[in-house]
Amino acid sequence: MAHISYEGDVDPTVLQGKRIAIIGYGSQGHAHALNLRDSGYHVVVGLPEASKSRARAIADGWQPVLPGEAAREADIIMLLVPDQHQRAVYEQDIRPHLADGKMLMVAHGFSLHYGQIVPPTNIDVAMVAPNGPGPMLRRMYSEGKGIPALWTVQQDVTGQAQALTLAYAHGLGCTRVGVIQTSIGEETETDLFAEQVVLCGGLTSLIRTAFETLVEAGYQPEIAYTCCLQEVKLIADLLYQGGINQMHKAISDTAEYGDYVTGPRIIDQHTREQMRGALKDIQDGTFARDWILENQAGLPSLLAMRRKDAEHPIEALGRRIRKML
Ligand code: NAD
Ligand code: MG
Ligand code: MG
Ligand code: MG
Ligand code: MG
Ligand code: MG
């Protein structure tokens, strides 16, 4: 059984008086900084002089300092720069300031799991990974609610790491709905797998292939677009609210019958084997190595695929339809 903690399980006072450095002020960074500040904690935002996020941070009432300065002054350092840049920021701005008993935190395990960051043994190391984008983390907190998070302590030299990590999750508002204990490996591998196979890669390939199949067979593209792409939201909302069984109750019997007979034809044994292959590439570091090398090479493949993606006719069509409907 997963171990879930709620507000009552946490002592938020352990974080009182600690100086928390939030490095990066993007999707997660702004939400962590603002939620922790509103929870009464001492937060400093660290950003490079040239960062585009500086203006936003200043508009939100911060006086950003350089990342190295923030790390030097802090007891707790949360690294919220893009995963592929964490190694460089860590080496240059964080590592020199990791005095005994400080705590280094991440919101996703990639850098720790794949050896991009190898923390010294004199500090605490922990993760709080909210299950959603920063703007949602911020909005839910502001409404008195929260989103779930995964958390783990990878290294505990102070004996305080678990209490501090849970207090941090509490400060984000996540214990209002529950936070699940995990490990760096489990969070990293399941997160990558889900985004590649279901949420992003699987879904976009499913939508595009189905759209192309309908258009190739002579159906109107506008109709193919609305039924294969736009209606995904309605089904996703039903799945979110009540799971698969509840979704089946809400759709027509015809749709439900078609689900049972055609779904397994599309996602078949071959797909299952491909999923296992994708998981293996994540587990053995193949995916991570390729992504790290891709970054070192200046993103040639990412930029080419991004361009090709943007040129697909479904994009221009989508822009037209969203204006019309
Ligand atoms: P982002 O791209 O939205 O923001 C990154 C921030 O880092 C920006 O403020 C940018 O200016 C700053 N930055 C870039 N290079 C920097 C440098 N060299 N030094 C200092 N700051 C620098 O990133 P994000 O999506 O918020 O991701 C941050 C972390 O949160 C990642 O580990 C990511 O996996 C994790 N995470 C993201 C989400 C999400 O939905 N976005 C959800 C959970 C966890
Ligand atoms: Mg992006
Ligand atoms: Mg995630
Ligand atoms: Mg992810
Ligand atoms: Mg229908
Ligand atoms: Mg029904």
Image: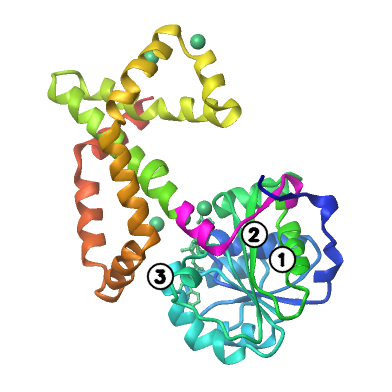
Give the label on residue 151, or none. Answer: 2
Lateral position of residue 27 relative to residue 39, left or right: left
Residue 287 visible, this angle:
yes
Q: How far apart are marks 3 and 2 (CA)?
A: 21 Å
Which mark sits nearer the N-terminus, 3 or 2?
A: 3
Q: Is residue 81 magenta?
A: no
Amino acid type of the residue that numbered disc 2 sits on in the rendered structure? Trp
Q: Where are the magenta residues, as a range?
A: 175-191
Asked if residue 49 shows in the view, the reply is no
Q: Which of 122 and 212 is in front in this view?
A: 122
Foreground residue among 19 and 56 = 19
State yes or no: discs 2 and 1 in contact (Cβ < 8 Å): yes
Label 2 SS: strand
Q: From the image, tell me which residue sits under label 1.
A: 165
**Residue behind label 2 places its C-beta within 8 angstroms of ligand 1:** no
Quadrant, the C terminus: top left
Q: Which of marks 3 and 1 is nearer the N terminus?
A: 3
SS at badge 3: helix
From the image, tell me which residue sits under label 3.
Answer: 84
- Please, is residue 292 above or below residue 302 in the view? below
Q: Which residue is drawn at 24% across and 74% down?
A: 297
Residue 172, image x, y percentages: 70, 57
